[in-house]
Image (cartoon, rainbow, N blue to C red):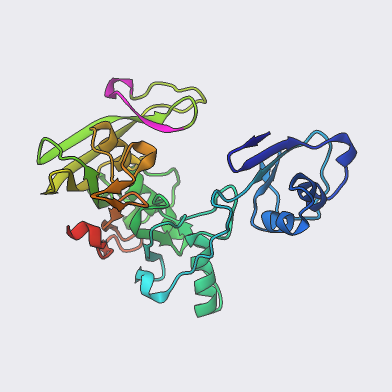
C-alpha cells in the first residue's frame, strides 16, 4: 500500500531469504540503482527498525516500509566555518539555514545538519566528537542550533532546556539548574494580520490529535491522557509586537516551554498564522510575493554553560524579513 512518499508491503512467501536489495528493487519496478540508493540513505525499515545493509536476508511475513524523500531528491547538506556561531570543548552552535533537517528523517540519515557537521569536523580536525543535538528546530526555521560535543555536558543541557534534573548521583555545580537558569529562547516571526495587544502571553495544552498532527488543547485539558499513551502538556509563550504592518505584524516570541511547533501553533490558534506556514493556515503569498517557507528565526539562545555555569548568549544574525 502506498501512502504519500512511503511504500508499505509484507514480504511474500516466495521472497523468503532473498536479499533486501532484491526485494526493494522489485518493489521499485526493478530499479536496482534506486533501491541501492534508498537503502544506503536509510530509507528501508523492516518491522519498524531501520536496515541499511543491502545484503540482509528478509523473511516472509515481515513488514517492509520504504521511505522516499518527499521531493524525490536526497539533499546534499554541507556545513561551513562561517556557520559556526560558537565553539568550545563542550558545545558548538550553528547558524541553521532554512530548508534543512537537523537530524535523520525516516527516509534519510545523511542529508541533515547533524551528519553534515560531523563530516565538516572530520575534514577539519581528522575526527568528529560524539555530537548530540541539544534541542531541535523545524526544517524551515533558521537560526541558533546548539550541539553538545561532550557527553558529560548532556545532563546539564537537558536540565537547562527542560527545567527537569535527570536522575543520577554524579552532579557538578553546573548541573544545579533552577527555574531562573533555564534556557531563554527568542524568535522573531512575521505573522498574518495584527494581534490586538502589543504584549500578551498564551498558555494552552499541547499534544497530538488522533491522526498524529500536533494541535492546541484547552488549558483545562493539560494532563489528560491521549490515544497512544501521551498526555496533554502545558505550552506557554510570551509575545511582543515589534512592528505593525497593516496586513501583517513582526512579533517576538519568548518561549517558557519547548513544545514541537509551539510558536506556529500558538499564532495560528490566535488567528495570526506565520506567513508561509501552510501546515497551520498561513498564506503562500504576501503582497503578491511567494513565501516558500514559514518566517520564523531562532535569533537568541541564552543558557548556563554546562561545565562552568557561566551565562552564555548565542546570537544568529536576523534575516532580511525581520528588518521590515
Q: Residue at x 42, y 26 (%)?
A: 231
Q: Is residue 115 magenta?
A: no
Work out whether residue 37 can be spotted: yes
Q: Residue furthest left?
A: 198
For residue 295, side relative to residue 58 (left or right)? left
For residue 203, side relative to residue 64 (left or right)? left
Task: Compare residues 2 and 304 and report the one nearer the observer.
Answer: 2
Work out whether residue 87 can be spotted: no
Q: Which quadrant would the N terminus be assigned to in this image?
A: top right
User: Can you give x and y, in whole percent of width and height, for residue 97 in the image?
Assistant: 38, 62
Q: Is residue 269 above or below residue 32?
A: above
Q: Residue at x 37, y 59 (%)?
A: 145
**Location of residue 235 (image quadrant):** top left
**Location of residue 66 (image quadrant):** top right
Query: Which residues make up the magenta segment?
Result: 213-221
**Location of residue 192 (image quadrant):** top left
How many numbered marks, from 0 up? 0
For residue 112, side relative to residue 246 (left or right)? right
Q: Which quadrant would the C terminus be assigned to in this image?
A: bottom left
User: Can you give x and y, in whole percent of width and height, for residue 227 in the image?
Assistant: 49, 22
Q: Residue furthest front?
A: 288
User: Can you give x and y, in whole percent of width and height, for residue 49 in the image?
Assistant: 67, 43
Q: Is residue 220 magenta?
A: yes
Task: Compare residues 125 and 23 and report the one nearer the observer.
Answer: 23
Task: Compare residues 298 and 77 and report the one nearer the observer.
Answer: 77
User: Can you give x and y, in whole percent of width and height, for residue 30 in the image?
Assistant: 79, 51
Amino acid at each position: 500500500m502506498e501512502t504519500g512518499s512511503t511504500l508499505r508491503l509484507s514480504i511474500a512467501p516466495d521472497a523468503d531469504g532473498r536479499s533486501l536489495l532484491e526485494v526493494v528493487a522489485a518493489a521499485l519496478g526493478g530499479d536496482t540503482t534506486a533501491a541501492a540508493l534508498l537503502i544506503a540513505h536509510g530509507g528501508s525499515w523492516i518491522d519498524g527498525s531501520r536496515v541499511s545493509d543491502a545484503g540482509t536476508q528478509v523473511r516472509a511475513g515481515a513488514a517492509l516500509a520504504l521511505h522516499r524523500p518527499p521531493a524525490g531528491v536526497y539533499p546534499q547538506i554541507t556545513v561551513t566555518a562561517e556557520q559556526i556561531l560558537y565553539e568550545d570543548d563542550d558545545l558548538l552552535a550553528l547558524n541553521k539555514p532554512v530548508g534543512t533537517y537537523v537530524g535523520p528523517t525516516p527516509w534519510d540519515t545523511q542529508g541533515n545538519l547533524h551528519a553534515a557537521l560531523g563530516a565538516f569536523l572530520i575534514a577539519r580536525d581528522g575526527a568528529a566528537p560524539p555530537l548530540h543535538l541539544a534541542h531541535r528546530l523545524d526544517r524551515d526555521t533558521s537560526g541558533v542550533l546548539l550541539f553538545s560535543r561532550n557527553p558529560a555536558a548532556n545532563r546539564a543541557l537537558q536540565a537547562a532546556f527542560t527545567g527537569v534534573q535527570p536522575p543520577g548521583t554524579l552532579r557538578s555545580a553546573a548541573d544545579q539548574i533552577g527555574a531562573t537558569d533555564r534556557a531563554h529562547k527568542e524568535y522573531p516571526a512575521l505573522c498574518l494580520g495584527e494581534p490586538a495587544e502589543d504584549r500578551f502571553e498564551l498558555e494552552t495544552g499541547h499534544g497530538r490529535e488522533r491522526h498524529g498532527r500536533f494541535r492546541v488543547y484547552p488549558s483545562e485539558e493539560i494532563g489528560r491522557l491521549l490515544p497512544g499513551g501521551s498526555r496533554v502538556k502545558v505550552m506557554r509563550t510570551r509575545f511582543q509586537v515589534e512592528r505593525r504592518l497593516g496586513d501583517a505584524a513582526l512579533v517576538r516570541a519568548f518561549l517558557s516551554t519547548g513544545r514541537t511547533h509551539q510558536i506556529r501553533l500558538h499564532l495560528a490558534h490566535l488567528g495570526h498564522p506565520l506567513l508561509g506556514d501552510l501546515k497551520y493556515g498561513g498564506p503562500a503569498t504576501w503582497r503578491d510575493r511567494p513565501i516558500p517557507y514559514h518566517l520564523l528565526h531562532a535569533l537568541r539562545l541564552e543558557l548556563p554553560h554546562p561545565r562552568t555555569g557561566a551565562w552564555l548568549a548565542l546570537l544568529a544574525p536576523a534575516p532580511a524579513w525581520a528588518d521590515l
